[in-house]
Amino acid sequence: MADRYLHLSGTAPGRFLTRRLGLPQPAPLRRWSLETPHLDGPLLHLAAGTPAVTGVAEVLSRVGLPVVGRADRPAAIVLDATGVATAAGLGDVHAALHPVVRSLAPGGRIVALGTVPPPGDHHQAAAQQALEGFVRSLGKEIGRGSTVQLVRIPGGGTAHDAESTLRFLLSPRSAYVSGQVIELTAATHGPAPGPASSPDPVADWSAPLIGRTALVTGAARGIGAAVASVLARDGAQVIALDVPQAHGELERTADRLGATALPLDITAPDAADRISSAAPDGLGILVHNAGITRDRRLANMPAERWTSVIEVNLDSVLRTTDELLKAGAIPRGGRIVATASIAGISGNAGQTNYAAGKAGIIGLVRSLGPRAAVDHGVTVNAVAPGFIETKMTAAVPFFIRAAGRRMNSLSQGGLPVDVAEAVAWFAQPASSAVNGQVLRVCGQSLLGA
Ligand SMILES: NC(=O)c1ccc[n+]([C@@H]2O[C@H](COP(=O)([O-])OP(=O)(O)OC[C@H]3O[C@@H](n4cnc5c(N)ncnc54)[C@H](O)[C@@H]3O)[C@@H](O)[C@H]2O)c1
């Protein structure tokens, strides 16, 4: 559904009016396109203190932006704060960013690099945790469509494991992601599945999913269709799954993408078997996206509404994941991405069932991620969308919808492609150090943590 306010505030009279009335000023966000794959301007590389990880400059030199030490109008600023180990050292963060923050181009990116301190040093732990409060606050005040994130690299490690993450955050692909903290792990996993002839995944950043089969549930429309589309764009062979009732829409989506349609209710007892049969050579990427809402306040909620939401949004995810992993249908290097929601973090009146299911997804990811890496060489992550413009949110009552769109640092709703880009980043073979993470794609919604 069109956001008329976003359109109006983008016109000269609208801008004048909204400024005078002190109303939100959403800036149009630039998404990735083949013509404009990169941000427009240089990348300013700064450090606070003496960096504690190696390889940052080398990785930044490959992200597609000219790296500079000084710039009038940087499109991105990367602040290496991995060496900040004391409260006094936080002064270096202020000293580095205070003089340049105003010069960041509209729609720019600030990425702070932090580290995961060893246990036992509470001064370093405090200083590194301080970066989180700093980043989340800067995200709330920076405005003009710019975003701010923190990436934690394991202590003593190198930035090479962070390359896919930095490429994502420093590109138009992360337009609707802000105020996020991503903690990388040191875990190494087996090689990603794919034919031996597939190109070196790190060398081919334009088609990183070539040779991988991806299954996306709930792919007929909305976010799922966008995920299927972005994974196909990145080279994956996609299997698009949706309920048999959505057959027509599913076929159209699959045809458009050169994907295979799999009409199947994900709650069916034989769902995992049917998925395995559809991907006889193994599933490199499994995206649990299907979801439903059956909103009612708890006092008015019949058991059927509770059960159906938990069944689709959580139970079927747990069951199919377990069965597919157990059957070896997701080979080493595989990627599982589930779909949570900010409702699962903040809670939402009328959504006890939905929020419980989505919070359960977060529990699943945090518990299974580390174990699946060790036992299967597979990563498990989740996206937690905020207000995304789809049929699901078009059904939300007008005033709640209007508030949902505006109540975030970017003052607008996201698009399905914003969630899809995050899923595609998790899905990359080069994202093997990204595990057990829940990335909010919510424009830094004011709801939740
Ligand atoms: N739209 C948002 O703002 C938003 C916010 C947070 C989380 N999410 C989550 O993102 C996911 C996609 O949301 P959307 O807005 O695109 O929803 P949508 O209703 O537009 O699409 C959901 C798709 O899932 C399919 N589906 C439902 N039950 C299924 C089942 N049992 N088996 C197979 N397919 C099934 C539907 O047929 C539909 O095609 C959901 O998990 C949703 O909870 C959405």
Image (cartoon, rainbow, N blue to C red):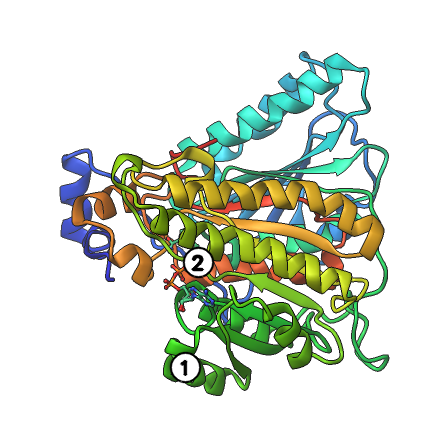
- Ligand 1 image position (quadrant): bottom left
Disc 1 crowd rating (10 Å Cα; few below 14, some 14-19, many 20+) is some
Q: Nearer the viewer, residue 57 or 198?
A: 198
Q: Label 1: which residue?
A: 247
CA gap, disc 1 and disc 2: 17 Å
Identify the amino acid type marked 1. Answer: His
The residue positioned 17% from the left and 41% from the top of the image is 18
Q: Nearer the viewer, residue 176 or 50?
A: 176
Q: Give the label on residue 291, or none.
A: 2
Is label 2 within 8 A of ligand 1 (CB to nearest ligand atom)? yes
Label 2 element class: loop
Q: Give the label on residue 275, or none.
A: none
Residue 34 shows in the view: no
The residue positioned 45% from the left and 71% from the top of the image is 225
Where residue 189 appears, as percent x and y from the top left, is 84, 55
Q: Answer with left or right where residue 349 lies relative to residue 72.
A: left
Locate residue 333: give its quadrant: bottom right
Q: Answer with left or right where residue 404 lies relative to residue 118.
A: left
Relative vertical location of residue 235 with respect to residue 139 in this rendering, above or below: below
Q: Answer with left or right where residue 64 lies relative to residue 177.
A: right
Identify the amino acid type marked 2. Answer: Gly
